[in-house]
Image (tube, helix red, strand yellow):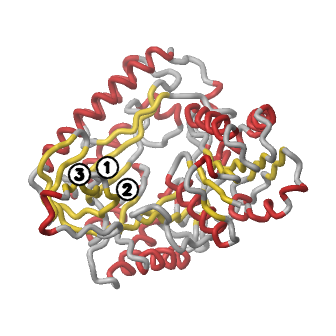
Amino acid sequence: MKFFVKTLGCKVNQVESAYILERLKEKGFLPAENEKEGELFIINSCAVTERAFKDVKKILKGIANYKPQAVILTGCAASVYADELKNLASSLKIPHFLILGQNEKFELEKFLENLENLPVIYEKINSDLTLCYPFLLKEFHGHSRAFVKIQDGCSSFCSYCIVPYTRGPSRSLPEEHILKQIGLYLSQGYEEIVLTGIHLGMWGEDLKPKRKLTDLLFKIEEELKKWEKPLHLRLSSLEVNEIDEDFLSFARESQFLCPHFHIPLQSGSDTILKKMNRRYTREEYLEKLNQLFKLFPQATFGADVLVGFPGEGEKEFLETCEIIEKSPLNWLHVFPFSPRPNTPAEKMKERVPKEKIKKRVSYLRSLHSQKRKDFLSKNLGSTRTAVFERVTKSGFTGLTDNYITVLIDFKENSNKLNFSAKKIGKVKLKEILNESIKAELL
């Protein structure tokens, strides 16, 4: 049977989908080259925003036209919207529609053994969310940078967020397991390791004895040194209150840490941050970013910004704009508030009109474009290390240590061309092309 995996949402979903693909191949299933060829279709879904859920429904309607033998839905939307999606699958007359929980998805081949004996609509969502499912990937299929999942779940319970309800509390993988996965990737030729999790900075809090993320980072640093070559270690995301003296000490000492920090802001208003249950103030956010900026003045500083949270008036929105303008932030992921089922924010009043949210989102996205353009301009003429990613019609792309997409032209670099996906090389940044930079291979 040929299968196709469709992944939505976060980096953790990408890692988990890679494991699903690898496991099915080992069990004799064949990966389809495209959606139309898939006899079995797997959707690893997201439910963080209303848009993410709409995407799940759109995909489900689209693949029904290809007449697959079975569709498996898993991921966050599976546990939140199971009833609505079962009704949709029934109306689409999908022969077998399986909904699997967060742990059941890692052993989905068991459910396929008796597919013909299963009901047309089948649901198995009773995951034990007290442990982080320990899997090892032999290869991160289709990627040039290796993502390593170190943690799952979140225990913060921000008032707008559905993730603690769909993925459970924070659970950590043991250090030995993580180091083994990193070693596997490095032995396959990957030269950039990206640590990822649902709440990365919570790693170790549930272990006995309790550990800190920096404990793990120093151990990874030791492992990377053994390879005696340039390598990248990138962190997917950190909360601002996790940037403490221990982390700053690691950042100062590390040979491999990428100068790229994604630190969610969500709002620049103390009033809104308190309603969001975010546990920091605007001044604390700005202070921590400036501490990192002094260490890494050429770093990409990214943030998520949630626009239109209940109670966000003009004053609160302008406070968010002010923090972004005066901070080192130069990469923004701006998204509109959408109430998530059964979260505290869903019941909050003082809703911001959709038209007003749309205008605010548009303004912040234009602010992002300007700040990013200024950042790219400051990097022109500099030399960076970059991991090479994919071939295009005219050359190939790479991603610098400080998170700039670079384009290397075949013709202009023909005498020194040495493209190899996964590998790191030196590039000189020469000319801005939209939000990328044309670079010379050194």
Q: Is residue 394 above or below residue 433?
A: below
Residue 369: quadrant of the picture: top left
Residue bearing the label numbered 3: 293
Residue at position x 24%, y 43% in the image: 328
Q: Quadrant of the C terminus?
A: bottom left
Q: Which mark is residue 243?
A: 2
Q: Is the Cβ of the residue at disc 2 closer than 8 Å to that at disc 1? A: yes
Q: Is residue 320 left or right of residue 372?
A: right
Please tell me whether mark 1 sits on a helix, a strand or a loop.
helix
- Dot 2: few (<14), some (14–19), or many (≥20) neighbours within 10 Å? many
Spot occupied by residue 438 in the image (x, y as percentages of width and height): 18, 50
Q: CA distance from mark 3 to mark 1?
A: 9 Å
Residue at position x 49%, y 40% in the image: 278
* N-term-proximal mark, 3 vs 2: 2
Residue type at mark 1 is Lys
Residue bearing the label numbered 1: 288
- Dot 3: few (<14), some (14–19), or many (≥20) neighbours within 10 Å? some
Residue at position x 41%, y 40% in the image: 304
Spot occupied by residue 79 in the image (x, y as percentages of width and height): 72, 44
Q: CA distance from mark 3 to mark 2?
A: 12 Å
* N-term-proximal mark, 2 vs 1: 2
Residue type at mark 2 is Ile
